[in-house]
Amino acid sequence: MKLEQVPTPAYVIDLAKLEANCRILQYVQEEAGCKVLLAQKAYSLYKTYPLISQYLSGTTASGLYEAKLAREEFPGEVHVFAPAFKDADLEELLEITDHIVFNSERQLRKHGPRCREAGVSVGLRLNPQCSTQGDHALYDPCAPGSRFGVTIDKIPSDLLDLVDGLHFHTLCEQGADDLQTTLKAVEEQFGPYLHEVKWLNMGGGHHITREGYDVDLLISEIKRIRKTYNLEIYIEPGEAIALNAGYLATEVLDIVENGMEILVLDASATCHMPDVLEMPYRPPLRNGFEAQEKAHTYRLSSNTCLTGDVIGDYSFENPVQIGDRLYFQDMAIYSFVKNNTFNGIGLPSLYLMDEQGDCSLLKAFGYQDFKGRLS
């Protein structure tokens, strides 16, 4: 079955592109002498973990369930960070994780000693107060009032007695130049501590596999930090693992006219690609162009009852007909990990596409998946 034959709606993962991304990350790992971890919050399709684990050193989780998934399905290290941990969750985490990073001094003092008793490496998240994200304020952990990390004025005097390593995560879909800027701030504020700890985790948001990303600068910065402070270095990309490695296939169900032509699809921004509305952003579409760029412009909408469930305006070289198929691109990341069944809308099936372009069904969803979440 080819992509054009896959029943819609469906997420289709391009295994060749996924592996190509992993090869780039493996190159960074080997050249920089660091460890690269998969941030599961962006991509958790565990049936592809055997492929990814050939290239990366482990995973990072945002809580108990992701950590359990990682330990069950992904060989290698398991790291966990959360703004706060429940006591019961922490007890389970101690049995399956290698590193636990705490967000505050209070959490560190409460749980750190128990972690060390269990042989788990303890870290503290830093807030270098260095915003580099521009228009992405929603995703800026250094923004004023952010709940993430400890600022330099809140560092406990006995920090080095409490931790094995330090962590920061300040980037979102950014380049190595922004990491370089952040590292300067980290060194200026926390440099003395870096000389005394065992490891530094530089978090995620590194768009390493994006075209034009300065991989050489990333490698040189990691090497510099590693050698200057004699540290083991971790990075935790999420999007970079599966960037441009997936499609959301959809069908045009109807065309409505109201000042312009509006396509009603069997895919939904609200249900199937929530970041379109949350960021917001306009997802890339195969053979789709900016509005008015080509002869035929349409608004792409969904089959839910939410008025604002609109994906965006696109133009096409040829008229679009009812029954035509459209393919949203870069849909492997922050898609099925965030989707939902609002309005009783079904979840898209999951397919894998091999190097020859043949697609195989991984999982199909139905009414019981909708009903099973309710009672």
Image (tube, helix red, strand yellow):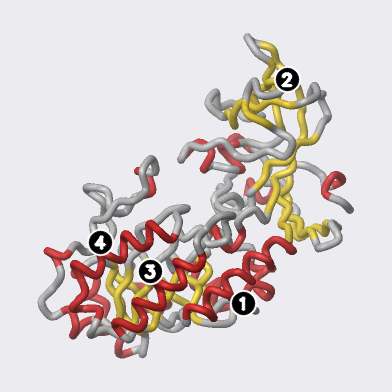
Rendered image quadrant of residue 276? top right
The residue labelled by disc 4 is: 127
Of the image marks 3 and 1, the number of the one nearer the N terminus: 1
Question: The residue under label 1 is which amino acid type?
Answer: Tyr
Residue 365 appears anywhere in the view = no
Q: What element carries label 1?
A: loop
In the rendering, at what x and y percent does residue 289 appear?
67, 31
Rendered image quadrant of residue 135? top left
Of the image marks 1 and 2, the number of the one nearer the N terminus: 1
Residue 218 vertical placement versus 33 (above, below): above
Of the image marks 4 and 3, the number of the one nearer the N terminus: 4
Question: The residue under label 2 is which amino acid type?
Answer: His
Question: The residue under label 3 is which amino acid type?
Answer: Met
Q: Residue at x 24, y 70 (%)?
A: 187
Q: Which residue is drawn at 73% across and 19% down?
A: 295
The residue labelled by disc 3 is: 202
Separation of residues labelled 2 and 3 (CA atoms): 45 Å
